[in-house]
Amino acid sequence: MAKKSLIQREKKRQKLEQKYHSIRRSPKKEISKASSLSEKWEIQAKLESLPRNSAPTRLHRRCFSTGRPRANYRDFGLSGHILREMVYECLLPGATRSSW
């Protein structure tokens, strides 16, 4: 189980990312349309004034049940070992163990 503080920090980042999503998207479009370098720098300064935790690259996918930040499968939202355990217990419909 992940520490509660890390999970809460991640939730806070998700809220910030949703809040600033449209604000962050518009200057990025303006940068590609800007002709001079000084205009690009001004627009970049606007982007840098936004909170760092509002950037989508700061988000991590976490396991739904344990909160583990690594080895997550997007389709299930679970980490690898939890996914394996659930498949063995037949809790995921359509997922089967491989045998060869």
Image (cartoon, helix red, strand yellow):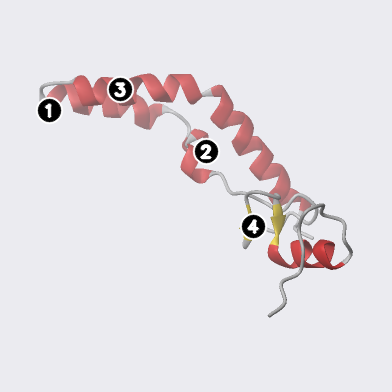
Kindly indicate whether the residue at mark 4 contacts the one at mark 2 (C-beta within 8 angstroms): no
Residue on which disc 2 sits: 53
Residue on which disc 3 sits: 29
Q: Amino acid at mark 3?
A: Lys
Q: Amino acid at mark 4?
A: Asn
**Relative to 14, does residue 99 appear above or below in the rendering?**
below
Numbered circle sitting on residue 37: 1
Dot 2 or dot 1, earlier in sequence? 1
Count neighbours of disc 2 (C-alpha within 10 A) and say few if under 14, some if 14 to 19, many if 20 or more.
Answer: some
Kindly indicate whether the residue at mark 1 contacts the one at mark 3 (C-beta within 8 angstroms): no
Dot 3 or dot 2, earlier in sequence? 3
Residue 8 position, x and y percent, is 72, 43
Kindly indicate whether the residue at mark 2 contacts the one at mark 3 (C-beta within 8 angstroms): no
Count neighbours of disc 1 (C-alpha within 10 A) and say few if under 14, some if 14 to 19, many if 20 or more.
Answer: few
Residue on which disc 4 sits: 72
Q: Residue at x 10, y 23 (%)?
A: 36
Q: Quadrant of residue 43?
A: top left
Of circles 4 and 3, the one toward us is 4
Of circles 1 and 4, the one toward us is 4
Q: Residue at x 61, y 35 (%)?
A: 14
Q: Image quadrant for the C terminus?
A: bottom right
Taking 41 as reference, is 14 left or right?
A: right
